[in-house]
Image: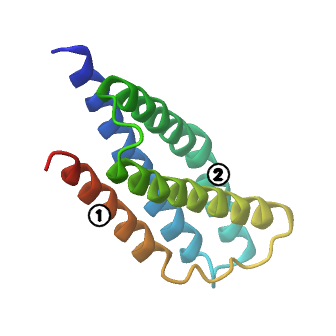
Amino acid sequence: MDSYSVVKVLHLTAISVFVGALFAQVRLVRSVEHGTVDVRKAVIDSVARLDVAVTIPALAISWAMGLVLIVMGSWFPASWLLAKLAVVIFLSGTHAYISGILVRLREIGDPPPALLKLETLILLSVLAIVGFAIAKSL
């Protein structure tokens, strides 16, 4: 397997782990909206551990391998790439938003705010990224 293929596999694996963990975080935070304080604290602590152990490293590896692929492919500043980067930045911001909710919940203990349609936005973002990657080869 050549180096480009290895980097691509690492990139796609990290993205899959990141998106899966992001969905899990949203679901878990939403699941405690009506829970008791003890249940809420236990779930929030679990989600925070998931974030540190899985989500953040997967996000970092996704970005690092993505940047390596951009350099290896000499794709900058292709229009499909700029559009894809905008969506990737949105997904990274979504993670930051969820992380902020976790910090707020751990420190203040307020019930989680409604995460309106966040799962749908994550899914649409992933589909857009896949579409931009396919457009690259056209």
User: Is residue 18 left or right of 37 when viewed as pictured?
Assistant: left
The residue drawn where x is 63% and y is 81% is 33
The residue drawn where x is 67% and y is 70% is 40
The residue drawn where x is 16% and y is 45% is 137
Q: Quadrant of residue 4?
A: top left
Whole-angstrom CA distance, mark 2 to mark 1, is: 26 Å
Task: Please state which of residues 42 and 33 is positioned toward the viewer in this rendering.
Answer: 33
- Secondary-structure class at tag 2: helix
User: Is residue 36 left or right of 53 when viewed as pictured?
Assistant: right
Question: For mark 1, what is the residue?
Answer: 127
Residue 83: image location, x then y, percent: 40, 57
Q: Residues within 10 Å of mark 1 (few under 14, many from 20)?
A: few
Residue 19: image location, x then y, percent: 41, 54
- Secondary-structure class at tag 1: helix
Residue 35: image location, x then y, percent: 64, 80
The amino acid type found where label 2 is placed reads: Ala
The residue drawn where x is 67% and y is 57% is 99
User: Is residue 4 left or right of 125 when viewed as pictured?
Assistant: left
Residue 119: image location, x then y, percent: 44, 73
Q: Residues within 10 Å of mark 2 (few under 14, many from 20)?
A: some
Residue 50 visible from this viewpoint = yes
User: Is residue 77 left or right of 90 when viewed as pictured?
Assistant: left
Which mark, residue 34?
none
Residue found at the far right of this picture? 108
